Amino acid sequence: MNKRDEFLRSQKILRIATMDKNKTPHIVPVWYIYRSKKIYIGTNSRTKKAKNLKKNDRVAFCVDTGINAPNIFGVMGKGKANLIFEKNKVNKLATAILLRYFKNIKNKSAKELLDDTDCVIEIIPEKFSKWSY
């Protein structure tokens, strides 16, 4: 596995940028999972990012760490996003995402988040860039 993929698998926060109807960027930090060269983000169809993606499937994203050299590293990219609504697939992916942040899904907050997740954003990256200092 290359350094980029290892990094994306190990980090916990990704910033996703979507475009609203006025062509204004909307950027939010999200929890995610990186698998099979794709990024998955659980969400609810009522969120601004999901509404934006229904109209424009183009996204940009960034994951970075460190504030002092030589420990600064980041990966950013752009690509196409799909909204997944199939209930079983959403539940499986959302559970996998939440297990990166909670010890188990029985946690009250994890249960609430899982219950509120009705779709998953699937990002298919088309271009990556990385940096380190």
Image: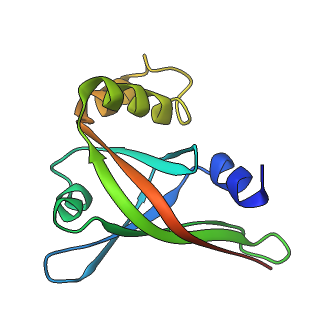
Q: Quadrant of the C terminus?
A: bottom right
* Residue 22 at x, y percent in the picture: 14, 83
| Image side of residue 22 versus residue 64, left or right | left
The correct choice, above or below, for 113 with respect to 4 in the image is above
Residue that appears at 53% across and 36% down: 101
Please, which residue is most extreme toward the bottom here?
23
Please, which residue is most extreme toward the top here?
106
| Image side of residue 76 versus residue 26, left or right | right
Q: How many marks?
A: 0
The correct choice, above or below, for 123 with respect to 60 in the image is above
Please, which residue is most extreme toward the front here?
126
Residue that appears at 15% across and 50% down: 46
* Residue 39 at x, y percent in the picture: 49, 50
The correct choice, above or below, for 42 with respect to 128 in the image is above
Colour treatment of the image: rainbow
Please, which residue is most extreme toward the right here?
70
| Picture quadrant where residue 51 is located | bottom left
| Picture quadrant where residue 118 is located | top left
| Image side of residue 21 versus residue 89, left or right | left
Residue in the foreground of this view, choosing between 28 and 33: 33
* Residue 102 at x, y percent in the picture: 52, 29
Residue that appears at 45% across and 57% down: 124
The correct choice, above or below, for 8 with respect to 133 in the image is above
